[in-house]
Amino acid sequence: MVKALDGILIIAYCGDLQAYPHKILTGRRSRMHTIRQTRGLAGFPKREESVYDAFGAGHSSTSISAGLGMAVGRDLLGKKNHVISVIGDGAMTAGQAYEAMNNAGYLDTNLIIILNDNEQVSLPTATVDGPAPPVGALSKALTRLQSSRKFHQLREVAKGITKKFGEQAHEIAAKVDSCMRGMVGGARASLFEELGLFYIGPVDGHKVEDLVYILKKVKDLPSLGPVLIHVITEKGKGYAPAEVAPDKMHDLRYPRGSGIGSLLPPNNRGAPLEVGKGVVLREGSRVAILGYGAVVQSCIAAAELLQVLGISITVADARFCKPLDGDLIRRLAQEHEFLITAEEGSIGGFSSHVSHFLGLTGILDGNLKWRAMMLPDRYIDHGAQTNQMEEAGLSSKHIAATVLSLIGNQRIDSVHFLNM
């Protein structure tokens, strides 16, 4: 999301791709190659990254909600600055966008919404045989708006009349024609007008002069209420490789690898998956690690690291947080001196559930030593997942170091182990 420093203009961008040009225009062009990488630019607008990012987003379809909130705040402060929300046709399929438009129509505050419609609705760009037409109710509605026969007939009549009044009058009429297409759409424009928005469009988004003209005219109207400008664009316009081959420059991997976070092959060995039951993946002694979720892979890797040091580890996959496998937890606690739970959740998650069980059953009253490993209670910045796990202290080395610290191994310092 974007704001001008003098408070005159606030622009809320929806999603990541919509914000990329904004990042380039606001002093981050030289760092675009670092986008989504560790300590690089964020994939979405981020307030901590730039004074020009007025709202931090984490997913699409938020720009109208954010813009409306800023517009209401502007009104409460008695200011007159403009607020513009930019949203794509794909993001427009989310319910949050319609909720925001409905609220904007009810509040009737000045808000400009630009619908960047590239006629894709976030569907695949092409098939083997050629371009794939977008499908669905929204696509059909937008297509009807673009192909209004009533509008085209009226436009031809207007052209014949304005020619009698000279070229200047004809040019003015053409501008009005472009701006007010929605006004002759009748019921066809009701998708937005019924929500209380003043609809303008469709407008050719690649005719910059016309687009600027329309934006200036809308800006100069002091009390128009919420306005939606329907802008038609072509995906990849201006970039020859994308125009020639819209189905290229995509990434598809098959079969998928088994990296961090990906699905592992079934480990039930053909046995039925019983709800609420975990499974022991590796038998050991003294120390048991009970993992939940993708972190189980790191638990296994930690056990392998410790095996080299002569430390035998039991690794179990909880598989379920609720219902909890009390029998498995009780067995691990009774057969081991040390128990570690590991998860990619934070406070109030799986480990808290296990702690509650251990306390209620009196297991913690014995000699069991238990430690919980989880995400810190804060947001972790974007980056490679391996780097994020390191920062969170949930890598295989961190799990192994926790085991060494828990059992009080004097031969190897756990801190030194992390640097190995």
Image: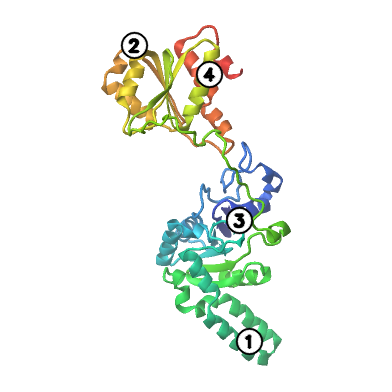
Disc 4, SS: helix
Q: Which mark is residue 159?
A: 1
Mark pair 3, 4: CA separation: 54 Å
Name the residue beneath numbered marker 2.
Answer: 367
- Kindly report the distance in space between the C-alpha atoms of the residues bearing marks 4 and 2: 26 Å
**Mark 2 or mark 3, which has the lower sequence index?**
3
Mark 4 belongs to which amino acid? Glu
| Circle nearer the N terminus (3, 1) | 3
Residue marked by disc 4: 304
- Quick check: 317 left or right of 118? left
Q: Who comes first in sequence, dot 3 or dot 4?
A: 3
Element carrying mark 1: helix
What is the CA distance from the residue labelled 2 to the residue labelled 3?
A: 62 Å
Give the residue drawn at x 53%, y 30%. Answer: 389
Residue 4 bears which disc, if any?
3
First in residue order: circle 1 vs circle 2: 1
Q: Name which residue type carries label 1.
A: Lys
Mark 4 or mark 1: which comes first in sequence?
1
